Amino acid sequence: MDEREDNSKVIDWSALADGHPAKTQHLENMALAGFVEELESKMTSAEETEEFCRTFSRLYAIHGLYGKKEMLFMPILYRHGVTGPSKVLWDTDDEIKKEVRTFGKILSPDNFWERKDSIFSLLQRIREMIQKDESILLRLSVCFFTAEEWFMIYRDSIDMGAAFLPELPRWKEGDEWLKNKSCEEKERYVDGKVCLPTGELTLQQLKSILSLLSLDITFIDKDDVLRFFVNEGRIFDRPLLALGGDVRDCHPSQILPVVNQLLEDFKAKKRKQMEVWRIIKGKPVGVRYLAVYGDDGEYMGTLEIVQDFTEAIKHFEDK
């Protein structure tokens, strides 16, 4: 066994700089633990019932906290060959998030007492997940991740924001890396142009145009590797860290059979598109999967387009 996977090792949080992504995730976990304790303290008397129901909605922030684990930490562990713990934790995350959504929709002072035991069980599962994140996920991450990988996680964490902390602490070393990275990218694309059959654009023009699209656009290549995305629609989290990773690493295990079948069908040309219409985060969302083929008919990859239709529906309803 790799000594880095030794469960007896404990992280010395004082040795990590303030703002380091692992330390920030640890602080988020501690803030969540404190909030769970606060909720439990409001479950003992009828006078607190209404306040509990109001406060419970703050637990929705768990989607953001777990999202960082699933989009930033777990994919890198996969790349280091550490797959088992992440898959198990991700499945449990999904179960917890589903329960939080369910109780958030139906919970009220009128039905609180009949659901009290189920809610208490949910809070206990969240406590257990915090312990697993601390002893397994974060410990393995600290042992395996490189400095460059931590910098990339920090970059994407800023965009994803805080969950249970008031704000994300800044990481001095990470900010210096971001500054240098920005300078490198500017030098790399000076006077660069993208030439297409219908015209040409500088990279800055192209970036500005794409930033105006209220869509999430993701492209994976013929080898199922995520190569490009535009995330202006903000329906799903799309961290830069996901680039270069297998598309399967961005999905929970129960969805993988659907993903695999779709890609197989696209490659075999059994179908060229699939549409999914769902309520996501309370919004009417359309998701289109399109097979991309070259001029020679060879499969080049898959394009996913995600769009929030709230405003469109409202426009037609108003008419």
Image: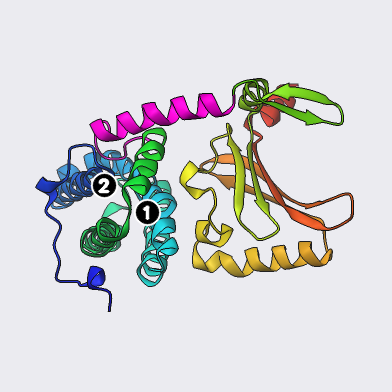
Tell me the residue that label 2 is attached to.
25
Q: Looking at the image, which residue sits at the far right?
A: 296
Percent position of residue 241, x then y: 46, 46
Structural crowding at the residue carrying mark 2, measured as other residues with C-alpha within 10 Å and reported as few (<14), some (14–19) or many (≥20): many
Residue at figure coordinates x 21%, y 49% from the top left: 26
Q: Is residue 192 left or right of residue 39?
A: right
Q: Work out whether residue 319 or residue 3 is closer to the camera in this orientation and state it.
A: 3
Q: Work out whether residue 26 or residue 11 is closer to the camera in this orientation and state it.
A: 11
Check whether the beta carbons of the residues at disc 2 and disc 1 lie within 8 A of each other: yes
Percent position of residue 44, x then y: 13, 52
Q: How many numbered marks appear? A: 2
Task: Name the quadrant of the N terminus.
Answer: bottom left
Residue 315 marker: none
Residue 174 magenta: yes
Identify the secondary structure beneath mark 1: helix
In the rendered view, tell whether residue 288 sits above or below residue 222: above
Rounded to the nearest angstrom, the CA distance separating label 2 from label 1 is 10 Å
Q: Which residues are magenta?
A: 161-189
Q: Residue flagged by tag 1: what amino acid is it?
A: Phe
Percent position of residue 189, x then y: 59, 26
Q: Quadrant of residue 27?
A: top left
Residue 73 marker: 1
In the rendered view, tell whether residue 219 sits above or below residue 156: below
Q: Mark 2 or mark 1: which is in front?
A: 1
Q: Is residue 75 left or right of residue 191?
A: left
